[in-house]
Image: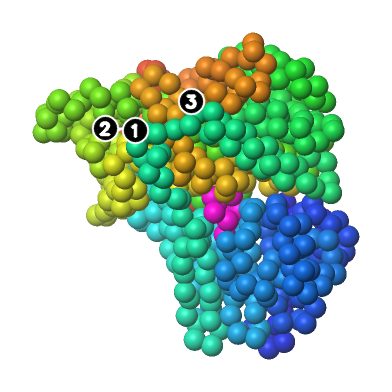
Amino acid sequence: MRHRGPDDAGIWWSAEACVGLGHRRLAIIDLSPAGHQPMQDSLEELCIVFNGEIYNFADLRRDLKAKGHAFRSDSDTEVILGAYREWGTDCLSRLNGVFAFALYDSRRRQVFIARDRAGEKPLFYALDKGALRFASELKGLLADPAFPRRIDRAALDCYLAMSYVPGERCILQGVNKLPPGHALVFELASGQLRLWRYWRLPEPSSAAAQGVADEAGLLDELEVLLEDAVRRQLVADVPVGVLLSGGVDSSLITAMAVRAAPRVKTFTIRFPGYGEYDETEHARLIARHFGTEHVELAAAESNVDLLPLLAREFDEPMVDSSMIPTYLVSRLVREHCTVALGGDGGDELFAGYPQYNRLLWLQQKLNVVPLGLRLAAAKAAQALLPVGFRGRNWLQGLGADLRTGLPLIYSLFDRGTRQRLMSGHGTWELPAERIREQRIPATADLLQRATRMDFGNYLAEQILVKVDRASMLNSLEVRAPLLDYRVIEFAFGVVPSHLKATSDSRKVLLKKLAARVLPKEFDLQRKQGFSIPLAAWLRSGPWKAFFRDTLLGSDDALFDRDTVSELLAGQVKGRMNSERLFGLVLFELWRREYQISM
């Protein structure tokens, strides 16, 4: 995992040699040797390894000094040690930041492990025969050639249905992810592990639930919160930039950054030859308006040879071809800075995705249609329309009860297709829908239900994983001010749904803030996803040949050949199978790289 920390490395063993901690360091706060990890406290009773940043470490340091704590470094790592000594595991509620850390307390002979609220920093662990292993990346565990390498079938079914593996599950048997907002304590004496959730999304206030809002007051509060979040996240002892796509979220981050720093550097990426994906002009408008030091970078051609590299680095395979431009962006930006601020989180917090409009529209229109009739239409769509047919997933979603459930609109493969894909592996259980249903938040408000679901699943397991792996592969730390926990709690606990989305508008409150602080000529309605023309590349040429060879050209191919051939043929006919095929290819490349068996 050298890419996660190219600046320094360290290994520490406890006196009795039963606890070992290893660390790779990307130096951002206190670049001196005093920031070296693993780090012990002055009494040598505590030792920590820590990945992330604590944005309020200066405030905590001041509070701890007032309580008599002394510090030997200027690092935020040492502040966690002091906070744990003062408040124990309750210190988590005081940390504003992104983190995955493990702290060994020799007094209690226990290891304390925690992960940040939104899940920006990863952590995998395995408990076997009273021994605990953990790492920031799955490949850290797989560095041991004796580590078991068998696929967890339920996790694979989730992957094929949802395009990621949700929650504490992992694609490998015997491995778990520590979920966002969770912590655990491992007792050395007993070999027992206790896991708990230390933070959850707040319930909507009574005013928010009733749709009552002081709009001007909410706008003021959001502006103050976002400005403070950006100010805190600009703190670093290395160069910091802003990833400026020209969309609402990144433009707001830029607007707040110029208030907090005398000189802000912004970066925009162009993809030569693909004009429909070029956001250069929108970013230039924001950069000119705020007087940033603007850098336009031209990404290299997206070569299919990148796929084996990304499959190797992404731990669990993930279905999102935008990992390619995210990796290319990170590689270019790293030549200029070590930390970059981005706009992730705005769509989940303030309802920016198009499906939120459609869900609200469906709720209005389908109330009068009996559920039985809708179920029949959903089954007919699945039976009569081929995979990849435009609108098929929405038609299948008609069977969902919008009073309590959520349709799986962006389903990768439905139950029948998954059964066919895995037909060569005996009886194939299909638990994904049940697992997903158990994760749907229990709230009557459809928009709250949908955004909370996406925050805890799609954002945590796909968006943030993509950004973390692609950026850290280039030793670049990407921060997300919109995911400051105070902004999260404001969005879900205070803002009423009608100020997030309606059947014909999205991101209502965030766009009102944008209208207040961005130039008048800025296009508030534009929504450009970060993507590549994968569908076009798969019609002919090296991408088509590579996909076909990966999925059909090997004797040990995992997925049913006839079903894969149908998907490939459908793509040539214009069906929407490019991401589905991408997911299968990434999985096969990953499985072969790490020699994973069924």
Q: Earlier in the sequence, mark 3 or mark 1?
A: 1
Question: Up-down: is 299 above or below 348?
Answer: above
Indicate the amino acid at tag 3. Val
Q: Residue at x 71, y 25 (%)?
A: 268
Indicate the amino acid at tag 1. Ile
Give the foreground label among 2 and 3. Answer: 3
Q: Is residue 556 left or right of residue 363?
A: right
Residue topped by disc 3: 508
Question: Up-down: is 247 above or below 166?
Answer: above
**Residue sticking out furthest to the top:** 521
Separation of disc 2 and disc 1 at Cα?
A: 6 Å
Q: Residue 516: where, in percent of width, then height?
A: 62, 22
Quadrant including the C terminus: bottom left
Q: Quadrant of residue 132?
A: bottom right
Residue topped by disc 2: 397
33 or 89: nearer the viewer: 89
Indicate the amino acid at tag 2. Gly
Q: Earlier in the sequence, mark 2 or mark 1?
A: 2
356 part of magenta stretch: no
Separation of disc 3 and disc 1 at Cα?
A: 23 Å
Q: Residue 449: where, in percent of width, then height?
A: 35, 41
Tell me the SS state at disc 3: helix
Q: Residue at x 66, y 43 (%)?
A: 229
User: Badges 2 and 1: C-beta atoms under 8 Å apart?
Assistant: yes
Q: Is residue 176 left or right of residue 380?
A: right
Question: Up-down: is 579 above or below 201?
Answer: above
Camera sees residue 48: no
Q: Tell me where the magenta segment starts and ends, as one range.
A: 115-123
Q: Residue at x 65, y 29 (%)?
A: 252
Separation of disc 2 and disc 3 at Cα?
A: 26 Å
Q: Main secondary structure of the magenta part?
A: loop
Q: Quadrant of residue 56?
A: bottom right
